Image (spheres, grey):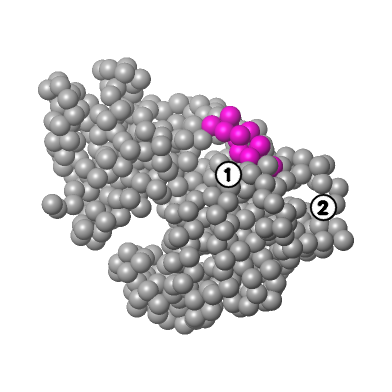
Amino acid sequence: MSFNARKSALDTLNTLDKGQHTLDYILEKKFNAVSAGSRQDRALFQALVYGVLRWRGRLDYVISHFSTTRFNKINPNVLNILRLALFQIMYLDRIPDSAAVNTAVDLAKTSGAPWVTGYVNALLRKAARKYQSISYPDQPQTSVAAMAVQKSFPEWIIRKWVNRYGSKITAALCDSLNSIPPLTVRANTLKASRDQLAEALDQETAQLQPTCYAPDGITFANPVASIPQLTAFKKGWFQVQDEAAQLVSLLLDPQPGETVLDACAGLGGKTGHIAQLMKNDGVLVALDRSDSKLERLKNEMQRLGASILSAVHHDLEQKLPRDQLTGFDRILLDAPCSGLGVIRRNPDIKWRSSKRNLIKYKDRQLCLLNNVCRYLKPSGILVYAVCSPEPEENEEVLNEFLNIHEDFDINKGFGQLPDTVGAMTDGPGVFKTFPHLKQMDGFYAVRLQRNP
């Protein structure tokens, strides 16, 4: 069966709307089908899915303007058909409006009553002629509702950021989060230097350049094949990792010969970096509550040539007996969070997050931090990190933790962070990045030390 980019994009958006899985998870499950398509089809599929999620707020405003049915009464599948077609009309110059409308009508034919095709056809043809002349809410500089439509963000996020940063910075932050980020990777120095990796990737990518701050990072665009099919990837010469995430591991500053815990290891992006900073010498424990993630992590470490790893299955919301995990020189807790700092790579986050969720994340983060800190040696270093700029997940977690644990303080050092990241520090031992300032993901990390 041939790969249909528009049908696959619709299936992806519909699955995402069910709220059971993240976009990353859905795309991973769809990987084999996507790989079956041509390079052009795969590019269109990605453009449609990510484009609709980035601009859903504005697309929905235009649909509401032209719809003869109340917006909240539109069938979810039909709504995604309209979003996909309208995105092509408004943002993809190479696709004729007629092609976008006709393929939407074809998709609508399989979605229910015959009148649906007529509704989709009429709305899209009218929108194609008139969408440029509709009036958007005025005064995006002062109105939360207007900025939410113009920048395609939920109102609660806009209101929160305007209150904290002001309208001008909020607009810049939204623009950055709506941009398409470069592919960023980290050279695996256990096997290749950054220069060696750059030479290898130069044959298979475009616009290649070193990252400005992370010493082992490279950005590029338009690879000739999917990442796992690149020659350097097969050799284990790199991992995909944003520059900000690379800097978090440098803040931890693991040393050869130490015993280190990656407490929420996930798929091992930072685990691999820690192993190479340790020069593959010492003990590195990767802990996660997902067996499937740990299996993939072990395969990933094998690809990278990281041989010092031990994988441990455990949910950190439950305490371990003290003798099972103890005596670590350094611990990284890259805690589960709202992900509001990585919206440019995961645009679904802005539509599945809520203000209420921030409190839930804060409570969980504090629980994990309270549980993991007891495994750290006296004088050891613990880095708490989240990919979110929100105070609930940053300063509020830190302050509550320090109030509970008098034997911990903020360590005023910055590990192996280069001097050039000084502008990203938020006081001694505290590190923050923002997408609109340094063109990297939004991270918060603090370096804590247990008193002797």
Q: Is residue 40 left or right of residue 189?
A: left
Q: Is the magenta stretch mostly helix, strand or loop?
A: helix
Mark 1: secondary structure: loop
User: Which disc number belongs to residue 337?
Assistant: 1
Residue 425: give x, y in percent of width and height.
71, 57
Does the stretch in magenta take in 45? no
Q: Name the residue under label 2.
A: 408
Q: In this view, does 447 lie to the left or right of 452?
A: left
Query: Mark 1 packing: few (<14 Cα in 10 Å), some, or many (20+)?
Result: many
Image: 148 above or below 364: above
Closer to viewer: mark 1 or mark 2: 2
Location of the C terminus by quadrant is bottom right
Does the stretch in magenta take in 357? yes
Please tell me which residue is depicted at 29% across the width and 22% down the height of the picture.
74
Q: How many marks?
A: 2
**Residue 446 placement: quadrant:** bottom right
User: What amino acid is labelled 2 in the image?
Assistant: Phe
Chain part drawn in magenta: 354-366
**Along the line of sight, which residue is nearer the eye, 216 or 298?**
298
Please tell me which residue is depicted at 64% across the width and 44% down the height of the picture.
318
**Residue 303 placement: quadrant:** bottom left
Please tell me which residue is depicted at 54% across the width and 50% down the height of the picture.
289
The answer to whether residue 155 of the structure is visible from this angle is: yes
The answer to whether residue 426 of the structure is visible from this angle is: no
- Earlier residue among tags 1 and 2: 1
